[in-house]
């Protein structure tokens, strides 16, 4: 072997050696898990029995319409999920954009204000959900505040999470609160990339701030808005932690969502063989997310 | 020089790669068991889903070690979903412990049906099983009826014993705060004799303390309303046969029948008296609310007293009684059969089967059960006989008086023979919550909804 070939061989070896851990991890954690999950969605299994009971597409059909004990609950959860998927991204944009415009126009304390508005993102998590629960209790600070401000009619004697008319809207508000910071930062970045000459020209032409935002800023920020909407859609569809911790789908299923249904099917069925159903539901959510991603790509391309 | 540096770089890269791959491989392979457990029969591992049992089990383990020389390491994995996931993953990696404390009457059969639990028939014969309270003795036994109900038991044999009862108790026990009762002008020593009297008690305590005079129950887990309150009430009003007919295949005698609607109307009388926010409270949170004086009454099981005590509620300030029977009903003196709440199982993968069986035998012996009961304030399934009051204390032992009575007056929560196969109690909870406290449906509509839920289960089973 010539010195040149030896050197090439070593370089080749070094290259593969560097990527090997990542490839190994992907094969073990990625491909294996994906393959396992897909197979499981066509089987009945409780995590214990040595063999799986293959059922073909039955898990999917049961969830969609065939099983009268499962399908109605899933349909209701899907409807709740749809409400969340619409309300959270739209609410996020509705709050984040004006906030970003305001922050962009502020000259003093901009850094501090940015940090303050970014706090919900840094602090969000299970502990914060428990803190929210405390705030929203019947005798919690939220009701106290409303009563103190003379807005007692807005207070909820049963608490905001135990009242069917406020439970889901309250969770939506908390989800918006958690997603506004990142959206605001994206908008801020977008605002700072707008050519100031364009804005100046609009002002010279007599456009007020609302008109400038509506006819110049908003169209220029449309790609960012699209990204925020689609990220919000995906998070709303897949996330279930807030529902698990704060209401567990209650009261009486009023805040049940498909992600929570999948979790319950996997771990709250008294070890019944429902892991396949949970997996099938997970894949149905994945397919919906995939369709959204495709839509995302197309919308982003069309906005260019 | 440069070549040497390059070579060392290659060597370092190769070493790091091998190390990382080794770590990945090690992480993904079975651990081969905890160092605490080994095949020498001198050390055992045990998992429980009840954190409140750990200290008591460990105390019993200390006693067991003095007696046998075998060390037992007890580990709690909670909440329930974490316990389930842990067993599932341990089953896959063949890393199950030697002994499991599981939910009796379901979990043991599903794990046992998968071949992961040892059959204890030869270790606990009929004579040994006589040490347990009568209604709990066969809780872990595979019967033809259970094989019909639980699909995972199809490969098991009738007569297999997958667990022996460990703790026992029953649902449908109401706890009253004596101080709040006295403040409302009620006799804190006298429990209500009828459902109507109980509603009267609630009216009085709520009038005395509108915000904190109601009743608490963990309705975030919606089926608790059905299993811990409604079932006992309906059973007492309708009697055994008519109550069981509510769950029948045809809806003619179901929940929407006049008798069924009457029981739902009785239950809905609770509506004005639930504490605020009750549907957002978990089971433990509802008990904590009662212990903190946020409710005058709390509904739970025999196991609730220990939890209340751990949360600062003095047992002497608690009046306990079973869900009172409605007047004009079939049963005027309702009794509640104790059922095995948890069971002890030996895993089939245990390398210390003999020692594990000895540990289970010790825990369920009069001596072991006494050590456990004294430390945990939980009722053991082992019949402690005359020693019960001394070991459990007056208040907990007093609950046992509701266990015995004529069979026709005794509600047995463990009897599932009349329900559809694959019965899922999580499905019957929400309609009842919509009836009370949410008032989203009236009794007739709730009855129709419950019949539809049961009908779907029967349809699935056929």
Image (tube, coloured by chain):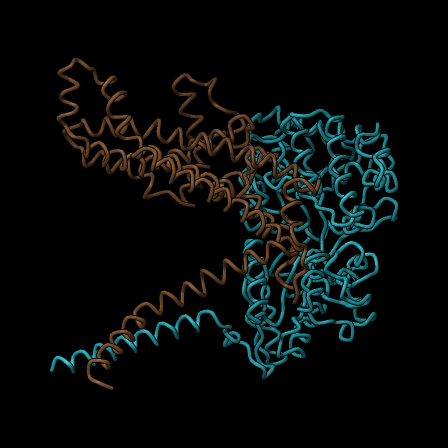
Chain colours: A brown, B cyan
Q: Nearer the viewer, residue B35 or B206?
A: B35
Q: Name which residue lies at 32% across and 44% down.
A: A122
- Most extreme residue toward the left is B1
Q: Name which residue lies at 71% across and 53% down.
A: B169
Query: Which image quarter holds the N terminus of chain A?
Result: bottom left
The answer to whether any part of residue A63 appears in the image is yes
Q: Nearer the viewer, residue B329 or B371?
A: B329
Q: Is residue A228 left or right of residue A113?
A: right
In the displayed structure, B6 sits above or below B173; it is below
Query: Which image quarter holds the C terminus of chain A?
Result: top left
* Residue B457 position by quadrant: top right
In the displayed structure, B104 sits above or below B424; it is below
* Residue B86 position by quadrant: bottom right
Q: How many marks?
A: 0
Q: Name which residue lies at 66% across and 77% down.
A: B353
- Most extreme residue toward the bottom is A1
Q: Position of residue B419 (x, y in %)?
A: 80, 46
- Most extreme residue toward the top is A206
Q: Position of residue B6 (x, y in %)?
A: 18, 78
* Residue A47 position by quadrant: bottom right
Q: Position of residue B379 (x, y in %)?
A: 69, 56
The answer to whether any part of residue B299 appears in the image is no
Q: Position of residue B254 (x, y in %)?
A: 82, 34
């Amino acid at each position: 072997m010539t010195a040149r070939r030896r050197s090439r061989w070593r370089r080749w070896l070094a290259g593969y050696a560097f990527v090997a851990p990542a490839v190994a991890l992907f094969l073990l954690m990625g491909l294996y898990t994906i393959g396992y999950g897909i197979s499981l969605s066509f089987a009945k299994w409780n995590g214990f029995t040595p063999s799986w009971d293959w059922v073909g597409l039955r898990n999917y059909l049961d969830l969609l319409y065939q099983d009268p004990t499962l399908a109605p609950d899933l349909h209701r959860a899907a409807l709740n999920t749809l409400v969340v998927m619409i309300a959270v991204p739209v609410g996020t944009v509705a709050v984040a954009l004006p906030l970003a415009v305001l922050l962009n126009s502020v000259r003093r304390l901009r850094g501090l204000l940015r940090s303050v508005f970014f706090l919900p993102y840094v602090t969000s998590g299970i502990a914060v959900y428990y803190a929210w629960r405390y705030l929203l209790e019947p005798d919690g600070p939220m009701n106290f505040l409303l009563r103190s401000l003379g807005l007692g009619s807005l207070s909820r004697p049963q608490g905001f999470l135990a009242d069917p008319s406020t439970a889901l809207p309250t969770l939506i508000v908390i989800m918006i609160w958690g997603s506004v910071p990142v959206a605001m930062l994206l908008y801020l970045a977008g605002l700072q990339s707008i050519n100031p000459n364009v804005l100046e020209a609009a002002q010279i032409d007599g456009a007020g701030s609302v008109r400038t935002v509506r006819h110049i800023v908003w169209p220029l920020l449309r790609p960012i808005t699209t990204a925020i909407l689609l990220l919000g859609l995906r998070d709303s569809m897949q996330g279930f932690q807030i529902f698990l911790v704060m209401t567990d789908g209650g009261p009486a299923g009023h805040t049940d969502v498909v992600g929570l249904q999948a979790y319950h099917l996997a771990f709250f069925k008294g070890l019944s063989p429902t892991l396949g159903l949970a997996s099938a539901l997970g894949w149905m959510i994945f397919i919906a997310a995939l369709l959204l991603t495709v839509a995302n790509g197309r919308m982003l391309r069309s906005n260019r | 020089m440069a070549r040497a540096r390059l070579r060392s770089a290659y060597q370092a890269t190769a070493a790091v790669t091998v190390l990382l791959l080794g770590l990945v491989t090690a992480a993904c392979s079975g651990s081969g068991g905890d160092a605490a457990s080994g095949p020498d029969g001198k050390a055992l591992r045990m998992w429980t889903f009840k954190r409140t049992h750990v200290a008591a089990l460990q105390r019993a383990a200390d006693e067991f070690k003095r007696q046998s020389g075998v060390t037992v390491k007890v580990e709690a994995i909670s909440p329930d979903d974490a316990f389930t996931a842990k067993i599932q993953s341990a089953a896959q990696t063949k890393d199950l412990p030697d002994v499991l404390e599981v939910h009796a009457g379901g979990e043991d059969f599903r794990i046992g049906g998968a071949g992961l639990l040892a059959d204890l028939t030869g270790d606990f014969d009929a004579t040994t099983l006589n040490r347990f309270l009568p209604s709990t003795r066969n809780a872990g036994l595979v019967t033809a009826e259970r094989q019909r109900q639980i699909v995972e038991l199809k490969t098991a044999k009738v007569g297999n014993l997958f667990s022996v009862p460990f703790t026992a108790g029953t649902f449908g026990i109401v706890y009253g705060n004596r101080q709040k009762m006295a403040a409302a002008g009620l006799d804190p020593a006298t429990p209500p004799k009828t459902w109507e009297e109980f509603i009267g008690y609630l009216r009085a305590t709520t009038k005395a303390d509108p915000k904190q005079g109601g009743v608490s129950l963990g309705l975030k887990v919606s089926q608790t309303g059905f299993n811990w309150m409604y079932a006992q009430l309906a059973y007492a009003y309708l009697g055994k046969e008519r109550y069981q007919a509510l769950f029948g295949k045809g809806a003619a005698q179901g929940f929407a029948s006049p008798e069924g609607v009457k029981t739902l109307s009785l239950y809905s009388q609770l509506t004005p008296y639930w504490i605020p926010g009750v549907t957002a409270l978990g089971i433990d949170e509802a008990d904590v609310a009662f212990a903190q004086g946020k409710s005058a009454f709390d509904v739970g099981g025999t196991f609730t007293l220990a939890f209340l005590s751990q949360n600062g509620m003095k047992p002497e300030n608690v009046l306990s009684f079973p869900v009172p029977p409605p007047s004009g009903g079939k049963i005027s003196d309702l009794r509640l059969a104790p059922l095995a709440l948890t069971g002890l199982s030996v895993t089939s993968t245990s390398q210390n089967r003999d020692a594990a069986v000895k540990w289970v035998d010790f825990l369920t012996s009069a001596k072991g059960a006494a050590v456990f009961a004294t430390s945990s304030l939980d009722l053991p399934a082992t019949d402690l006989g005359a020693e019960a009051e001394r070991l459990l204390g007056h208040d907990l032992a007093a609950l046992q008086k509701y266990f015995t009575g004529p069979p026709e007056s005794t509600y047995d929560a463990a009897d599932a023979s009349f329900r559809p196969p694959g019965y899922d109690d999580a499905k019957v909870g929400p309609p009842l919550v919509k009836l009370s406290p949410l008032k989203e449906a009236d009794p007739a509509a709730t009855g129709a909804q419950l019949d539809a839920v049961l009908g779907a289960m029967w349809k699935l089973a056929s």
